[in-house]
Amino acid sequence: MPEKIKISAVICELNPLHGGHARLFARAKESQNALVCILSGNFVQRGDAAILDKWARTRLALETGADLVIELPLPWACAGAERFASGGVALAEALGCVDSLVFGCKTEDAGALTRIAAALLSPEYAACLRALPETGDPFAKRREQALGQLLGEEIVPILREPNAILGIEYIKALRKGSSSIRPVPVLRQGAGHDRPARPHELPSSSELRQALLAGRDVADMVPESTGACIRQLQAAGAFPCSLEYLERAILCKLRTLPLADFAALPDVSEGLEHRLLVAARRAGSLEEFYTLVKSKRYALARIRRLALYAFLDLRAPLPERPPYLRVLGMSAMGEAILRQAAPTLPIVARPKDLEKLDAAGQALFALEARADDLYALSSPKAQPCGRDYTEKLIRV
C-alpha cells in the first residue's frame, strides 16, 4: 500500500501572487508532502475584479508549489470574512484528505485565535452583544467590545488585523463542522494592508495592485513567475483587470434595479435597500455610489460587495455550502492527492463532469460562467466568452 500523503491546504486570492504567498506555500510544505490551494475565482472578497484571471493565478500557484488548485465559487469568493472562510473550509473538508489548514497571520498563537473563535461561538458572547447599548457603531466595533468583556481588553488588538480575523473565521468554521483538519497560523511577513512597504520589506497585495493599476513596473517587487505572467497578459491586452472597465455597465445595472431587487441582495437589512436605491440614481461613478451609501454602520467593503452582487445577479438566499469541487489545475502530486481523496462532493475537472451535478450545482456553475463572461470585459482589451467551458485543466 502506498504511503499516505500528508496534505495541507491554503485558502487564498493571490491577487496578485507575491513573495509573501511564496513563503507561505513553502512553510505549508515544510512538514507536509503536498499542498492544496483553494483559490478565489475572478471576483474577490473586497467586491472587486481580480487583477489577474483565475487561470493565470492557477498556473502561478502551481509554479510556486501548489499541487492541486480548487476554485472557491463566486458566492463565497466575494463574501465577507465569515462566509469566505466557511466556503473554503467546506471545500478542504469535502476532499476528505486534508490534514492541516495553513494561513498567514500577524500572530502564530493558535491558542489565542482558538479562544477567540470559541468565544464567538458561545452563548455568552451572543448575550454580551445583545446587552451592548445601541450607539450606531459598526458591527466590528461592537464585536470588539463584547469580546473585550469576555476575554479581556488585551485580546482586542488581534481583532484589528485582517489576516487574524480571517484566521479566526477559519477556526470557527472548523469547529462548527467538528473537523479533524488542524489550523496552522504562520507569521505573516511584510507590510500590512494599510501601509506601503519599507525598504527590503515584502509589499502587500493592495500596494502591488495600486502600483500595477497606476502602470508602474513591479518586476523587483514580485516573484519572477508573476512578473513574466503579467508581461505576457499585458501584451495580449488582458491585464490589468479592473472594475473601471465595467463601471458604466455596473452603474447601468444599479440604475435600473427596483427597490425590491435591492432588498433581495445578500447582506441587505435594516432598510439599507433605500440608501442603495437613492445612491444608484444619484451616483455618476462607482466611487460616488460607495460614498453615498457608506455610513458609520455600513463599511466600505460591504457596500462594494453589494454593488457587485447587484451587477452579477447574486440574490438571497445564497447556498449554504459549495455543491462541487471544481479543479482548475494540478501537478503530478495533485493527481496523487485526488487518488487519495475521499470526496463528499462531485469533482468537476472537465465540462463533461457537469453532467454529474444536481440542479443546484448546475445552476451555480452557470452563474459562475456568466459572471466570468462579464469579467472578460474588465481588461484593456475585451476577452472572449465561455472560458469556463473551453479552458483546459492546467497541468504543471
Image (spheres, rainbow, N blue to C red):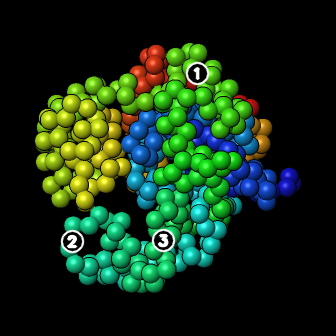
Look at discs 1 and 3 and give the one toward the viewer: 3
| Contact? badges 2 and 1 (CB < 8 Å) | no
Location of mark 2 (residue): 135
For residue 386, say whether it is visible.
yes
Measure the alpha-carbon separation of dots 1 and 3. 40 Å
Q: Image check: 192 left or right of 342?
A: left
Near-viewer residue (264 or 49): 49
| Residue ID at (64%, 42%) | 18
Near-viewer residue (31 or 157): 157
Measure the alpha-carbon separation of dots 2 and 1. 49 Å
- Specify the quadrant of the image occupied by residue 392: top right
Q: Amino acid at mark 3?
A: Pro
Q: Amino acid at mark 1?
A: Leu
The dot on residue 233 is: 1
Location of mark 3 (residue): 157
Q: Amino acid at mark 2?
A: Thr
Measure the alpha-carbon separation of dots 2 and 3. 21 Å
